[in-house]
Image (cartoon, helix red, strand yellow):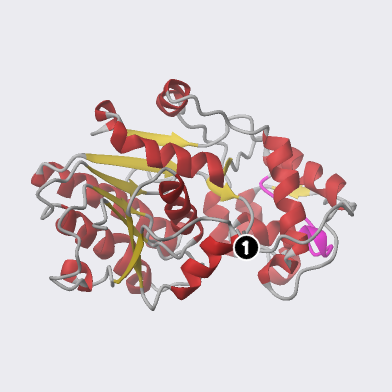
Amino acid sequence: MTPDSLVLGATGFVGRSLVAELLRQGRTVAAAVRGSGDRLTAWLAGQGVESSRLTAVTCDVTVPGLGLRENAGLEAVRDVYNAAGRFAFGLTVQEARSVNVTGALNVADWAATRPGLRRLVHVSGYRVSGGSPDHRREGPYEASKKEGDAAVRARAAELGLPLTVVNPATVIGPGQFIGLASLVRDLRHRRLPILPGGPGVFVPVVDIDYLVRFMAALPEHPETAGRSYWVLDDETPELPELVALLAAHLGVPAPRWSVPVGLVRRLPRALTGVDPETLSFLSKDRYDTAPALAFAERIGLRMPPVGQALRRWADDLVAARFGEGPAERETAAGRGAPRGTR
């Protein structure tokens, strides 16, 4: 069967879940991978997802044309989902830009060659607004996401692409072992001596299943072309309350003190236990989620209660040993069997 959708970053946390959602909806999907695709199909099988309508294609977003063969069988692709991204702290500027800027532009250019293109859905970051990227202050990762967001919008306008930008917050769910997961790991192992940021700091989250259902629906609705959506749960507790909630669930003490971000920047990492590059994510900013909530309402999509989602994620993290080893037999609260990386 000829694919009608292409998912870039298909083996990543968001990408693989999006592939699963599209297949469940009866779509015929091409998954862009760096290797054979066996890891993705094995993961899908573990989720009970039938993959006969899945085609794995070898791809490299860092090169023009995405490294795709001319006879890759993608002529009928209508919807292109770019969930590819390089997320890590400690990247060089070039490492971050190669995927998050150059790669994003290469995807847009390739999408423009599809004669029946219905939509390009670009996954950006939620902290991409507010001026030019500053690699020194923000760090290469966040600066590259900000630069990539602006570059893709400009390229789409230049080429006349039907673009929708999705700006998700911290995505949580089984198998998510990076980002906020490192804070949960340190909390679990009692290695979080202080809480950076303090009152008012807002680190929003969004459930993975909610996010991919939101994304999958976008091309079906013409009015979402040319729009961008902050996809996050406004009910996420402020950081001190979020950490207290998780600490109570994990059965460990929460940090007794919080320290303003400006002071944390000046303290030794050995004392704070905080990677300096993570501090740019600690802010009191709020985001305009009204358009995303209105669209979700139209398609009948509801977020799970955020406390429930956070506790369930913490259980999965503990059961999977934070992705670092064999799963534990019990969840954080001592219930159920290990689920590992769903």
- On the image, the x and y values in percent for residue 266 come to 63, 61
| Residue found at x 23% / y 57% | 2
- On the image, the x and y values in percent for residue 129 come to 37, 41
Residue 137 visible:
no
154 above or below 6? above
Front residue of this view, candidates 246 and 199: 246
| Residue found at x 32% / y 48% | 122
- In this rendering, would 199 be left or right of 213? right
- In this rendering, would 76 be left or right of 278? left
Q: Quadrant of residue 72?
A: bottom left
Q: Is residue 79 magenta?
A: no
Front residue of this view, candidates 261 and 305: 305
Q: Quadrant of residue 176?
A: bottom right
- In this rendering, would 151 be left or right of 26? left
- The local crowd at label 1, few if under 14, some if 14 to 19, many if 20 or more residues have their Cα within 10 Å, is many
Give amino acid for label 1.
Phe
| Residue found at x 79% / y 41% | 245
Which residue is label 1 attached to?
177
Mark 1 falls on what kind of element?
Answer: loop
Bounds of the magenta span? 186-197
- On the image, the x and y values in percent for residue 236 come to 64, 35
Front residue of this view, candidates 198 and 209: 209
77 above or below 302? below
Work out which quarter of the rendered image holds the C terminus and state it.
bottom right
Q: Quadrant of residue 341?
A: bottom right
- On the image, the x and y values in percent for residue 119 come to 23, 42
